[in-house]
Image (cartoon, grey):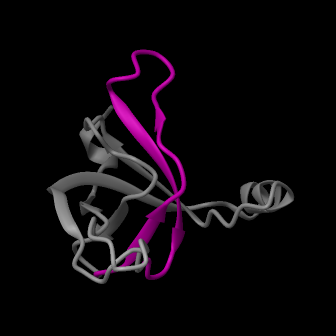
Amino acid sequence: MRGGKLRHRVAIEAPPTGRDATGGMAGGTWTVVFASLPASIEPVSAREFGASNRIGSEVTTRIVIRWAPGVTADMRVRDLTTGDLYNIQGVLPDPKSNREYLTLPCTTGINDG
């Protein structure tokens, strides 16, 4: 992956892991897993957005990062420049090596876990 396309800096955060007395997610803070990764943040085109809506998805943004171990769909991405939050909907490895880059289809907004 060419570094010039990765012009944003993002953090990958994991949700709180605590449980309350009823077994639900307890309040807490998100944990930074990767503090500063180069990334490409691209809005999904109108055509792609229309296609994704047919399957019930709300993907609005595609984020591409260099391959990083352990990134999962329950995590979120924080744009370190704007502070915007993106909820990861899936983790797609590159089709050739599976270890060069990851594509993260995301929705925007706050994810409280």
Give the answer, above or below, for where 48 lies relative to 86. above
Name the residue rendered at 72%, 61% in the picture.
Answer: 57
Residue 32 location (% of width, % of height):
17, 63
Furthest residue in direction top, as rendered: 97
Residue 90 location (% of width, % of height):
52, 48
User: Is 104 colored magenta in this rendering?
Assistant: yes
Name the residue rendered at 37%, 54% in the picture.
Answer: 40
Residue 103 location (% of width, % of height):
46, 43
- Image check: 74 left or right of 82? right
For the residue pair 17 and 32, the one nearer the viewer reads as 17
Quadrant in which the N terminus appears? top left
Residue 15 location (% of width, % of height):
31, 66
User: Is 81 colored magenta in this rendering?
Assistant: no
Give the answer, above or below, for where 61 lies relative to 71. below
Name the residue rendered at 24%, 72% in the picture.
Answer: 30
To which quarter of the image does residue 41 belong?
bottom left
Quadrant in which the C terminus appears? bottom left
To which quarter of the image does residue 82 belong?
bottom left
Furthest residue in direction left, as rendered: 35
Give the answer, above or below, for where 1 lies relative to 12. above
Write the start and end of the magenta stretch as one range.
Answer: 83-111
Name the residue rendered at 40%, 38% in the picture.
Answer: 102
